[in-house]
Image (cartoon, rainbow, N blue to C red):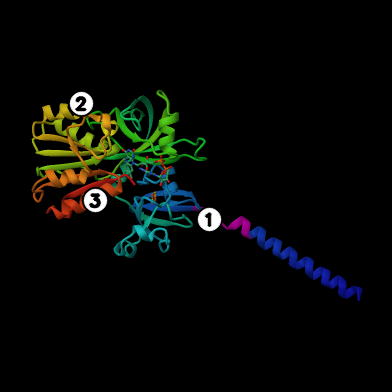
Amino acid sequence: MLGAFLLAVGVAVAINLVLTGLILFAGATVGDYGECTVRVNGDREVKAAGGRSLLSTLKDSGIFIPSACGGRGSCGLCKVRVEGGGEPLATELPWLSKDEVKGGVRLACQVKVKGDLAIRIPEELLSVAQYEVEVASIADLTHDIKEVRLKLIEPGAMTFKAGQYVQFEVPAYKLTDEPVYRAYSISSDPVDRGAIELEIRYVPNGICTTYVHRHLKVGERVNINGPYGDFRLSDTGRDVIFIAGGSGMAPIKSMLLEMARTGCRRNAEYYFGARSREDLFLEDLMQRIEREMPSFRFIPSLAAPEGGDEWSGETGLVTDVVGRRAGDVSEKEAYLCGSPLMIDACVELLKKKGMPEDRIFYDKFS
Ligand SMILES: Cc1cc2nc3c(=O)[nH]c(=O)nc-3n(C[C@H](O)[C@H](O)[C@H](O)COP(=O)(O)OP(=O)(O)OC[C@H]3O[C@@H](n4cnc5c(N)ncnc54)[C@H](O)[C@@H]3O)c2cc1C
Ligand code: FES
């Protein structure tokens, strides 16, 4: 009897020991993928401890992929062609076309590096760098948009095209436990390579905009990376329609500064939508550009002018104003920047008015 009891206890202890061993083994190995190699464009090799996202692994090796949402899977910008990364996750599918899925395109922020991978990225991304910058000035453009001038410290100069954007690194602070990145279009003239300007609109409780509007100080040093994006003025010579709202002003301003400086003679109309007078800004600059570039017209409109606004200009949504004033657009091209809602409405309108879709370029601030 005692023998049977001792045997049962012994078996139970043995099973327990085996189970504990298995659990310890699993704990030590699950999530430990050892050193993995990511081969980039066939020649460059990145070696890193596995287990992190492909986006972070590349960033730590100085390869920056556009990631406007900071890796949350909600911008769809971090596309890379991956061999060996497995099937796309359900979170990636809304961002990928059938051809992209077939071709192995994945969102780098959603791919976990668990073994060796081979990836392909556009060559131009290999020249994107991280910059340490110093805040040179912060100015109010409106009640909710600030212009932030950043002096480049290391490297000390950036080459970018008018219309491109950078990613601003928000350090950990009370709204975020870890650094996060957000995209901001460069609003300054590309000729000024030693400093860049951003126009940042406050989003209530937004991680980056709260930091910039409530905490960022002149003299503070932060990191940015870039430049990114292919929202750039073509060299077709066609007449141009610019349409923007709010901080969508930023990349258009950069394009206009460059056009004025280089003596561009293209006909250009700029429709800028604001809610009321207090949301309108940079009118003096736009008037100066009109004087320097006689083929340019700035057409601001107010959607909801207030009693004291004393406004004799255009009123209504910017789409209504474009609909009324733009005339025949079939031979022109358009550059749109602002909220996804505004852009979708403008694209529909321009197509209805006869502009081919492949001549409508935009940057959605999603
Ligand atoms: C290519 C690109 C260029 C951009 N350039 C500019 C620029 O020049 N100037 C600029 O101000 N912004 C720009 N943005 C938007 C910017 O990247 C951020 O998304 C925005 O500043 C909000 O960041 P946040 O960290 O403060 O808010 P988050 O912490 O990301 O968001 C907080 C909450 O607000 C919501 N939210 C986020 N953005 C908005 C919004 N715009 N309006 C209303 N609710 C919102 C979110 O859904 C969330 O619920 C750009 C975006 C892209 C993709
Ligand atoms: S970083 Fe935005 S979807 Fe990947």
Q: Quadrant of residue 63?
A: top left
Image spot of residue 69 (x, y percent)? 39, 46
Left or right, 137 with respect to 312, comes to right
Q: Residue at x 43, y 50 (%)?
A: 72
Left or right, 329 with respect to 257, comes to left
Q: Which residue is mark 1?
A: 33
In reply to whether residue 316 is colored magenta, the answer given is no
Image spot of residue 31 (x, y percent)? 55, 55
Between residues 214 and 253, which one lies in front from this camera angle? 214
Image spot of residue 273 (x, y percent)? 23, 39
Q: Residues within 10 Å of mark 3 (few under 14, many from 20)?
A: few
Q: Residue at x 38, y 26 (%)?
A: 135
Q: Is residue 160 visible?
A: no
Q: Range of the magenta residues?
A: 26-35
Quadrant of ligand 1 in image = top left
Left or right, 233 with respect to 276, comes to left
Q: Compute the Cα span from label 3 to label 2.
A: 28 Å
Q: Which residue is mark 3?
A: 345
Type of residue at label 1? Tyr
Q: Compute the Cα span from label 3 to label 1.
A: 47 Å
Type of residue at label 2? Asp
Q: Residues within 10 Å of mark 1 (few under 14, many from 20)?
A: some
The quarter of the picture where the N terminus appears is bottom right
Q: Residues within 10 Å of mark 2 (few under 14, many from 20)?
A: few
Q: Compute the Cα span from label 2 to label 1.
A: 58 Å
